[in-house]
Image (cartoon, rainbow, N blue to C red):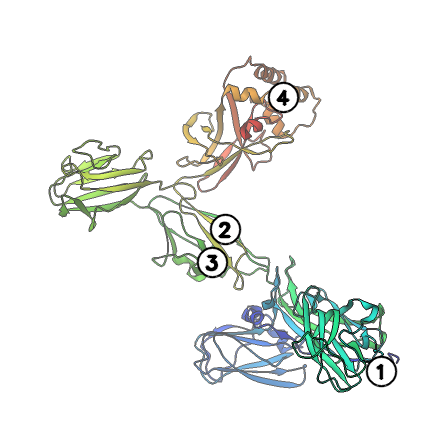
């Protein structure tokens, strides 16, 4: 039968947006901006970004309308009546019930919207309206999808399959069989003996498959088994795969001189067996001749559409069209041109916002109130920051929202960010009440022998109420009399032992204080309590982590809000191995004590700052300004790093053989720092390599962010701004000092 004599007809269903996708529709305000205080019979202003389109020529395809309530409009019996057209000219209307703090959706599709009317009662909060859409996603989920079905009828028997192809740009569309097998095209076929041709007689047990082997189909199809006689007492056990990898089977009851059809679509068929029950594997004999084939007649196949995340900032929303072509035997079946109408999918571009590391600085004893601009934020879609989430709590100090401690994963609307306050440690006064104390304990601020936390650099006053029980600070617990008294930073007002009413002991905690001290009565060794001593300033003192939200999504990862207290600059130092090959570069500078000079070349800090095992040093207390920095290494380390290769390299630069050295090579070659590379530098490196030069080996530091470390020797320090520095061992042109550091 010719294709052109009997032509299949194809139909598609309307679009079905997943409920989760609808909940994220167009930020809820594509048609109407959020407005509060709407009463019964009021009309929502159509003033959103899509309103002119909705009131004019209409959307490119009819859309689901979404109306969002911030309050409980369900209990208030609020309804929303949407008026518009279905096609630009045919009037259509639908009234929907409001929901509690969520979004209600029309089931009717609107090409234009002329009016949205509040009914039933007064709204309890703000209301906005938009359209249904799916969101772009980096990893697709069912919750951000839209589906429709494709169905064919009057498929001619026995012809080559008709193949429906999904043609897309900007979305991913595929025939979804509910399992792992998915494809952007599929066959539509009716062939009653494709699996097994008509048997010569009755069949006992298994049918003979075409080719006597597994039947593999290009697309899953429903299996037909046609009986020439009454096989209603028999079942046909179909085995195979319902997807590309899922083994499956189905018992199909026979018919009386007709075709039985499976309820599952099979991708492969390994066997069809006649059995005597709907769960039996015992073979039976058919009543007559049999044959087996496939059918797609009037079968609905689901197309799922998702939107991949991309870097393009499209208009919101944007329409993506899915077109359908039909081919046969690899060529376009022209008789089916435009047989299946295009599908227009509404996509919302929602590139995830990005949280970026931020730094704020506050002085000692000074609270910091956050601003929205403190939370570094970027969004490819241009959306503003809506809220933050605290994903890791502060290490020290207190982070409070409106006077209450912030909890882990607490969300904070950006409108409330002015209520978010960081409180570092503060100077503090304690009341030591002798009248409430006993020979076994002190009463301090109403508690017996409490453990107190004190911070270096802060001042604490102990006020005495009542007489007796001389009050001392000690380096060791439970000692007699005044033994092991700790006096550094301690002063007294009144009696020398702070034993009388109105006396005060004032303690300014020094930076070199031990981690633990004790307060104790000199007359009663068991009358004591512990003092924990902590750092109260520096880089990252109160650091916490946060994510940002653009109104729809949180950023994929958290960023650090570094809270610096006092004059602190976190500095990371690595060795610059310019010419090094075969071994790692950028080795960390660990356990090195820095010499810091001012712009006049005078030492201002020497011995106070030493890098840790991560190459980091916190320059607490270094005043803002311009400096140069270096550190000293031992002769033995220098001797390992500087050798004949370095001599040759500096000679090449001084003689012009190396006519284009990098600025880093110049730094390493200029051993005397005069800005010239000549015979003096060659001689210096030669002496260092041979051991004739036994002067201190100096490693100079440069700002790693500067493009020319040779000319720009100045390091600018600004409190609260971290530094990245590179270290240069003069004369080590091949970078072998990195080997020493790595060993």
Residue 649 rendering spot, x and y as whole percentages: 65, 22
Residue 282 placement (x, y as % from top left): 69, 75
- Tell me the residue that label 4 is attached to: 646
Secondary element under disc 2, as helix, strand or loop, is strand
Would you say the residues marked 2 and 3 are in contact, meaning their CB atoms lie under 8 Å apart?
Answer: no
Residue indicated by mark 3: 388
1 vs 3, front mark: 1
Q: Which residue is mark 1?
A: 6
Q: Disc 1, disc 4: CB below 8 Å?
A: no
Mark 1 → mark 3, Cα distance in angstroms: 62 Å
For image coordinates 55% across by 26% down, the residue present is 740
Whole-angstrom CA distance, mark 3 to mark 4, is 54 Å
Task: First in sequence, mark 1 or 3: give its number.
Answer: 1
Q: Earlier in the sequence, mark 3 or mark 4?
A: 3
Distance from disc 1 to disc 2, alpha carbons, whole Å, reads 64 Å
Q: Earlier in the sequence, mark 2 or mark 4?
A: 2
Where residue 88 appears, as percent x and y from the top left, is: 67, 81
Question: Which structural element holds mark 4?
Answer: helix
Q: Quadrant of the N terminus?
A: bottom right
Q: Are marks 3 and 4 in contact (CB under 8 Å)?
A: no
Disc 1 or disc 2, which is closer to the eye? Answer: 1
Report whether residue 201 is seen: yes
Q: Is residue 335 above or below residue 668?
A: below
Among the two numbered marks 1 and 2 on one chain, the one whose residue lies closer to the N terminus: 1
Q: Which residue is mark 2?
A: 559
Q: Earlier in the sequence, mark 1 or mark 4?
A: 1
As helix, strand or loop, the secondary structure at mark 3 comes to: strand
Q: Earlier in the sequence, mark 2 or mark 3?
A: 3
Q: Residue at x 44, y 62 (%)?
A: 415
Q: Nearer the viewer, residue 702 or 250?
A: 250
């Amino acid at each position: 039968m010719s294709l052109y004599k009997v032509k299949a007809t194809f139909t598609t269903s309307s679009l079905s947006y997943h409920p989760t996708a609808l909940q994220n529709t167009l930020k809820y305000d594509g048609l109407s901006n959020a407005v509060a205080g709407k009463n019964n019979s009021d009309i929502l202003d159509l003033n959103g970004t899509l309103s002119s389109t909705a009131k004019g020529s209409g959307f490119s395809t009819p859309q689901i309308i979404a109306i969002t309530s911030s309050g409980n409009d369900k209990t208030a019996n609020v309804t929303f009546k949407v008026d518009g057209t279905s096609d630009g000219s045919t009037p259509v209307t639908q009234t929907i019930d409001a929901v509690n703090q969520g979004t209600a959706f029309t089931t009717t599709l609107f090409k234009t919207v002329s009016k949205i009317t509040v009914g039933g009662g007064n709204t309890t909060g703000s209301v906005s309206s938009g359209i249904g859409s799916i969101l772009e996603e980096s990893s697709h989920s069912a919750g951000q999808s839209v589906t429709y079905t494709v169905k064919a009828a009057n498929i001619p028997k026995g012809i080559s399959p008709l193949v429906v192809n999904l043609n897309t740009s900007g979305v991913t569309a595929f025939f979804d069989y509910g399992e792992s097998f998915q494809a952007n095209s599929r066959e539509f076929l009716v062939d009653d003996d494709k699996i097994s041709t008509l048997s010569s007689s009755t069949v006992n047990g298994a049918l003979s498959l075409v080719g006597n082997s597994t039947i593999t189909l290009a697309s899953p199809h429903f299996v037909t088994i046609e009986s020439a006689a009454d096989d209603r007492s028999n079942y046909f056990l179909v085995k195979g795969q319902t997807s590309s990898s899922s083994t499956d089977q189905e018992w199909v009851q026979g018919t009386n001189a007709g075709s039985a059809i499976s309820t599952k679509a099979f991708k492969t068929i390994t066997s069809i067996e006649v059995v005597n029950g709907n769960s039996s594997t015992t073979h039976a004999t058919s009543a007559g001749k049999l044959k087996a084939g496939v059918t797609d007649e009037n079968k609905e196949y689901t197309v799922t559409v998702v939107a991949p995340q991309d870097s393009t900032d499209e208009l919101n929303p944007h329409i993506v069209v899915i077109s359908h072509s039909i081919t046969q035997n690899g060529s376009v079946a022209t008789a089916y041109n435009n047989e299946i109408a295009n599908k227009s999918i509404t996509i919302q571009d929602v590139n995830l916002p990005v949280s970026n590391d931020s730094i704020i600085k506050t002085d000692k004893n000074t609270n910091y109130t956050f601003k929205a601009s403190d939370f570094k934020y970027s969004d490819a879609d241009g959306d503003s920051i809506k809220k933050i989430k605290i994903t890791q709590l502060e290490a020290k100090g207190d982070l409070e929202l409106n006077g209450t401690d912030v909890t882990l994963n607490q969300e904070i609307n950006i409108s409330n960010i002015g209520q978010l306050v960081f409180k570092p440690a503060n100077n503090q006064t304690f009341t030591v009440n002798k009248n409430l104390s006993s020979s076994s304990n002190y009463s301090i601020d109403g508690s017996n022998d409490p453990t107190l936390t004190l911070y270096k650099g802060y001042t604490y006053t102990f006020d005495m109420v009542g007489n007796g029980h001389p009050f001392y600070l000690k380096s060791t617990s439970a000692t007699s009399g005044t033994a092991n008294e700790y006096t550094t930073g301690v002063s007294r007002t009144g009696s020398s032992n702070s034993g009388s009413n109105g006396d005060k002991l004032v303690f300014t905690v020094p930076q070199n204080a031990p981690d633990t001290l004790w307060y104790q009565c000199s007359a009663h060794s068991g009358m004591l309590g512990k003092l924990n001593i902590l750092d109260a300033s520096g880089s990252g003192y109160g650091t916490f982590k946060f994510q940002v939200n653009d109104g729809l999504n949180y950023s994929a990862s958290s960023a650090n809000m570094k809270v610096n207290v006092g004059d602190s600059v976190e500095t990371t130092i690595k060795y610059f191995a310019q010419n090094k090959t075969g071994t790692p570069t950028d080795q960390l500078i660990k356990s090195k004590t820095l010499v810091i000079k001012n712009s006049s070349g005078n030492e201002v800090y020497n011995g106070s700052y030493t890098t840790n095992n991560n190459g980091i040093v916190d320059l607490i207390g270094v005043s803002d300004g311009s400096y140069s920095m270096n550190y000293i290494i031992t002769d033995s380390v220098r001797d390992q790093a500087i050798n004949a290769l370095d001599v040759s390299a500096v000679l090449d630069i001084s003689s012009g053989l190396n006519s284009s050295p990098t600025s880093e090579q110049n730094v390493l070659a200029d051993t005397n720092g005069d800005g010239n590379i000549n015979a003096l530098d060659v001689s210096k490196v030669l002496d260092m390599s041979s051991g004739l030069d036994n002067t201190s080996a100096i490693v100079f530091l440069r700002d790693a962010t500067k493009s020319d470390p040779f000319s720009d020797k100045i390091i600018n320090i600004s409190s609260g701004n971290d530094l990245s520095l590179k270290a240069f061992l003069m004369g080590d042109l091949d970078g072998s000092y990195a080997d020493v550091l790595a060993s």
